Amino acid sequence: MNKTKRKHMIKQDFIRVFAQKLETTQAVAEHIIETYQETILESLETYDSLKIGEIILIEKKEMEEATRILNGNTITTPKHTVLKAKVTKNFKKL
């Protein structure tokens, strides 16, 4: 069985490539990325979902309190909010 090892891009490599695309410094590129992330999170405080271009849909979902048994112990998870990202059909074509 021939398994191809998956490659994972680390943040600094992404920042370097992004800076090259923008023809700017890595510090400016990192600031843009951080501001973009902050804006996404702030937007999801107001809206239930956010579509990013034609690639990703981020949805906010409220999870109710849940109780379960784990290793003989009763565990209760309080009500909380989770974010789920869905890849759009256009992105799946890659």
Image (cartoon, rainbow, N blue to C red):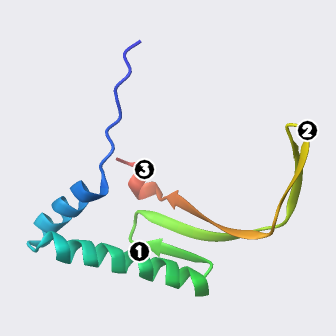
Location of residue 79 with respect to 13 vertically, above or below: below
Mark 1 or 2: in front is: 2
Q: Nearer the viewer, residue 29 or 53?
A: 29
Identify the residue at horizontal 41%, vertical 63% (top origin): 55
Q: Nearer the viewer, residue 20 or 26?
A: 26
Horizontally, residue 17 falls left or right of residue 32, namely: left
* Residue picked out by circle 2: 72
The circle on residue 37 is: 1
Identify the amino acid type marked 2: Gly
Location of residue 56 with respect to 89 vertically, above or below: below
Residue at mark 1 to residue at mark 3: CA–CA distance: 22 Å
Total numbered labels: 3
Residue furthest to the left: 23
Residue furthest to the bottom: 46
* Residue picked out by circle 3: 92
Question: Can you give x and y, in whole percent of width and height, for residue 32 in the image?
Answer: 27, 78
